Amino acid sequence: MDTIETVIKPGLGPEILHFKDDQEAILQSQRGNRQAFGFLVKKYMQRAYYTALGLVGSHDSAVDLSQEAFIRAFRSIKKFQAGKNFFTWYYRILRNLCFNHLRDRARHARPFSEIREEELESITDSDGATGAVIERNETQRLVWEALESLKEQEREIIILKDMQDLSYKEIAEVFDCPVGTVMSRLFTARQALKAKLERLYS
Amino acid sequence: MMINDDQERFHILLMGAVDDELDADERKEFARLLAQYPGFVKEFEDYKRLKEATKAMRFKNPPAELWDSYWLNIYNRLERGFGWILLSLGSIILLTFAGVEFFRALVFDSSLPVVVKIGIFCLIGGLAVLLVSVVRERWFVYKSDPYKEIKR
C-alpha cells in the first residue's frame, strides 16, 4: 500500500486517510473503509455543495443533499467501476436527489427565484468602482433570473459546463451520451438562455 | 440546403469553439465556416459574451465551519445507519422470541378462560391480516410506480 502518503490516527473514528489518487481511495472504500471514503468526501465536498446549490438554490438543501448523496455513494461504492471518474459517478446520484427535491418543493410552491438571489455572491471589483459593481451585480441578477427560468436539464448542463468546469467528456459520462450530443444540448440550453436574456434586457 | 447543413454544423462547432474544446481539424472547419458566412461571426461573439456572463457567476461562500464539520456529519450518519441496522436486527430477533414465548404461554396456560384465548387470537389474527394487506398494497404500488428508479 505505498500509495498511502500519511495516516492520521488510524482507528475507528472519523479521521481521514490520505491517498495520492482517487482509485486507491475507492478501492479501500469498496472494502468498507470509511476513513478512505473520507478522502473522497474532503476532495469533492465543495464541488458537490456548489453543484447542488446551483441546482436547488438553497444553502441548507445543498448541504443536506450533497451529504446524502455521499452517503448513498458509499453504500453503493462496490458498484463503481475502476478507472471511471468518481465525481461524475457521484454526480449522477446527486442530480437524482436534487431533481426529486425540486419536484417535492414544486408541490409546496416555494418561490424559487427569491431563494436563489439570496445565494448570489456580491462581487466587488478590485478598483471598488461603484458603477461597475452595480452593473456586474445587475448582470448577475439578470443571468440568474434567465437561468432559473430554463428547464431543469438546460440549467443543469450550463451549470456543469460554466460553473463546475466539467469537460465535454465528463458531461458525456454523466449523461451517458456521446460528446456530440453534449454539444448539441449545450447549444439548445445556451440558445434558450440567450433568448431569455434578450427578453429581460429589452 | 447547403446553408442549413452548414448552419447545423456551425452550431455544434460553435459550442466547442466557445468552450475551447475543438480539436485541430474542427478548428479549421470552424474557421472556414466563419470566413464563408459573415453572419456567423456575430453569433460567435454573442455566445462568447454569454459564456463570460455565466462563467462570472459566483455563489456566496458558506460559513467556513461547514467544511470542518462536513465529513464528520457524513461519518456520523454512516455510523448511525449501521447502528440502525443492528438495532433493527436485534429488535426483530427479540420480538420474534417474545412472540413465540407469548404464544406458548397463552396456549399452555390452563388458568386462562378459553374465551379470552379466542379473543387474543382473533386480535392477533386481525392485526396480522391488516399488516399483510398494507404491505401487499405498498408492494403493488412500488411495482407499478414509473418513478421508482428516480426516487431511489
Image (cartoon, rainbow, N blue to C red):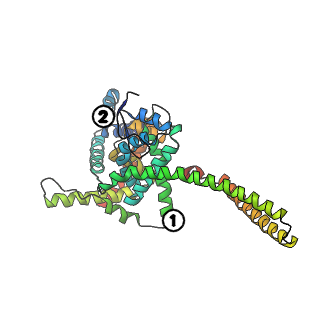
Residue type, numbered disc 1: Arg
Q: Quadrant of the N terminus of chain A?
A: top left
Q: Position of residue B43 (x, y in %)?
A: 30, 44
Mark 2: few, some, or many residues within 10 Å (few <14, many ≥20)? few
Q: Nearer the viewer, residue B33 or B71?
A: B71
Q: Tag 1, which secondary structure?
A: helix
Q: Position of residue B110 (x, y in %)?
A: 86, 67
- Give residue B4's mark: none
CB within 8 Å, label 1 to label 2: no
Q: Is residue A142 left or right of residue A179?
A: left
- Residue found at x 42% / y 42%: A11
Q: CA distance from mark 1 to mark 2?
A: 50 Å
Reading the image, the residue beneath label 2 is B36
Q: Is residue A175 above or below residue A23?
A: below
Splitting the image into 4 quarters, where does residue A148 fall? bottom left
Q: Position of residue A99 (x, y in %)?
A: 48, 54
Q: Chain of mark 2?
A: B
Q: Which residue, as the protein is rendered here, is positioned at the far front?
A: B111
Question: Is residue A58 in view?
Answer: no
Q: Is residue B96 left or right of residue A46?
A: right
Reading the image, the residue beneath label 1 is A107
Mark 1: few, some, or many residues within 10 Å (few <14, many ≥20)? few
- Residue found at x 20% / y 61%: A134
Q: Nearer the viewer, residue A83 or B145?
A: A83
The number of numbered badges drawn on the structure is: 2
Residue type, numbered disc 2: Gln
Q: Nearer the viewer, residue B4 or A118?
A: A118
Q: Tag 2, which secondary structure?
A: helix
Query: Which of label 1 and label 2 is nearer to you?
Result: 1
Q: Position of residue B138 (x, y in %)?
A: 67, 58
Q: Is residue A31 above or below residue A195?
A: above
Q: Are marks 1 and 2 on the same chain?
A: no
